[in-house]
Image (cartoon, rainbow, N blue to C red):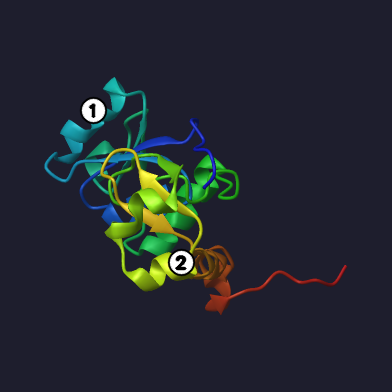
Amino acid sequence: MREPCPSRRFAADRTLGRLARWLRLLGADVLRDPSLDAAQMLRRARADERTLLTRDKRLRTARDAFYVASNDFRAQLREVMARFHLDPQPAMLSRCSRCNGELRKTDRDAVRRRFPPFVYASQNDFAACDRCGHIYWRATHPERIMRELDAILSFDPGRGGLARPSTEG
C-alpha cells in the first residue's frame, strides 16, 4: 500500500457517498458524515481546513466549497480530478474506502482468521485500516479499479463514448 497524500483533503456532503469512496481509493482524505446536512458539513470542513464537495446549489458561492454539477459518479470524479489536478498514482489504495482511515501493511499471520482460508493460501500482502480494522488484499481489485478509472478518465462526452488517446505522433 502506498503512503497517503496529505494535500488532498476534502469533505463530501451526504449526496456524494460514491464519489467519496472513489476519491478514497485514489488516496484522497475524504471526510463524510451522512448525518450532517450540507451547511453543517461546510462548517465541519472549515474547522478541518478541507474543501467541501457538494451538490447543494445554495453553497455554490462558498469560497471553500466546490459544487459538483453532475449526478453521475463517473462524471463527478472527472470534475473533481480536473478541478484539483489530482494524480491518482502517488497515493492510490492508501485509504480505507469505508471509513477514510489510513491503510497499514500488516503481517498475514496476524490477520489469518479474519478471511477465508483460500485467501490466506493465495495472497501474501495484506493491509489493515488503522481506524475500522477492515482488512484489504490485492486480489483482482486494483486491476478492476484501474480499468474503471481508465474508462472514467478517457470518456469523451462530445463523441458519445470512450475516447482513447491516440498513439500516433
Q: Name the residue under label 1.
A: 44
Q: Residues within 10 Å of mark 2 (few under 14, many from 20)?
A: few
Q: Mark 2 points at which residue?
A: 141
Q: In this view, does 94 lie to the left or right of 34?
A: right
Counting from the top left corner in percent of width and height, residue 44 is at 23, 28
Three-letter amino acid code of the residue under disc 2? His
Query: Is residue 139 at all visible to an observer of this figure?
Result: no
Counting from the top left corner in percent of width and height, residue 53 is at 34, 42
Q: In which quarter of the image is the C terminus?
A: bottom right
Query: Is residue 79 at all visible to an observer of this figure?
Result: yes
Tell me what residue is drawn at x 36 percent, y 48 percent.
Answer: 110
Tell me what residue is drawn at x 32 percent, y 31 percent.
Answer: 62
Q: Residue 146, located in which quarter of the rendered image?
A: bottom right
Q: How far apart are marks 2 and 1 (CA)?
A: 32 Å
SS state under label 2: helix
Q: Residue 159, located in which quarter of the rendered image?
A: bottom right
Q: How crowded is mark 1: few (under 14 residues within 10 Å), some or many (20 or more)?
A: some
Three-letter amino acid code of the residue under disc 1? Arg
Tell me what residue is drawn at x 51 percent, y 59 percent.
Answer: 124
Tell me what residue is drawn at x 27 percent, y 53 percent.
Answer: 17
Precedes in sequence: disc 2 or disc 1:
1
Question: Which of 1/150 is in front?
Answer: 1
Q: Farthest residue toward the front? A: 109
Q: Residue 72, located in which quarter of the rendered image?
A: bottom left
Q: In this view, does 168 lie to the left or right of 2?
A: right
